[in-house]
Image (spheres, rainbow, N blue to C red):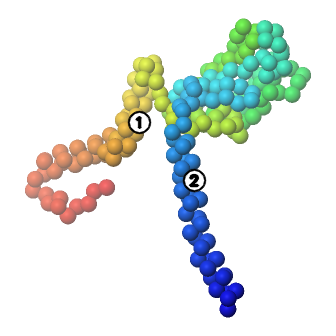
Amino acid sequence: AGAAGGEVETAEAAPAEEVPAKKDADADEDEEDKGPKPEGNGGSTERFVWTQTLSEVQIVVDAVKLGVEAGQLKSKMLDISIKKGHLKVGIKGKTPLVDDELHQPVKTDDAIWTVEDSSKIVFTFEKVNGMEWWKCICKGDPEINTRKVEPENSSLSDLDGDTRQTVEKMMYDQRQKALGLPTSEEQKKQDMLGNFMKQHPEMDFTKCKFN
């Protein structure tokens, strides 16, 4: 009977042990939120450094990463292939440094790469979805916390009218949600409902429920 009692006590104690684990997970998430903003809204891997705006990504590959001394890199040495969802970067005749699937598709017609100072390759890609922040460049790369990514105010003026309006709306909605206030769409619906109610005072809205 004593052994059975011990088993009961163990079973009852198990759920209580899970509570601190959940708190630790929450604490880790809080710590992640308190972390620094990703530099250039991007990150770095063992192979390259990258930055991004809402519509573009830029990747910098140092010559040394390709096994070439700084100042000795020439475009004719390179084996580069850019596809909508795949990137290959290397030296001809050698194993590629990068030969991976991209995190998200890019517009190949607008892809640009240049060799700068014979020491690095700079790629500039336009995102197919110009309204999404990337977590990484290649699938499997270390991911950044996109919750820390923020568009620079100065860069908003560089966007075309429709894109800028959309970005500003997204930023406004994000602030409203954080304050527990209605988003622009919710406010628009409330305003439309208010106007409708004013135009139809004969209707009884007291029992209506609106989402």
Amino acid type, residue under disc 2 in the picture:
Ala
The residue lying at 20 percent from left, 64 percent from top is 207
Q: Quadrant of the N terminus?
A: bottom right
Residue 42 percent coordinates (x, y): 60, 29
Answer left or right for 170 relative to 193. Answer: right
The residue lying at 37 percent from left, 44 percent from top is 177
Q: Which residue is mark 2?
A: 25
Using the image, determine if residue 55 lies above or below residue 117: below
Mark 1 burial class by Cα count in 10 Å: few <14, some 14-19, many 20+: some
Say which of 98 and 30 sits in front.
Answer: 30
Answer left or right for 181 relative to 28. Answer: left
Q: Quadrant of residue 87?
A: top right
Q: Are marks 2 and 1 in contact (CB under 8 Å)?
A: no
How far apart are labels 2 and 1 at the CA level?
29 Å
Amino acid type, residue under disc 1 in the picture:
Met
The residue lying at 63 percent from left, 29 percent from top is 43
Q: Quadrant of residue 80?
A: top right
Q: Which residue is mark 1?
A: 170
Q: Which mark is residue 73?
A: none
Name of the residue lying farthest toward the bottom: 1
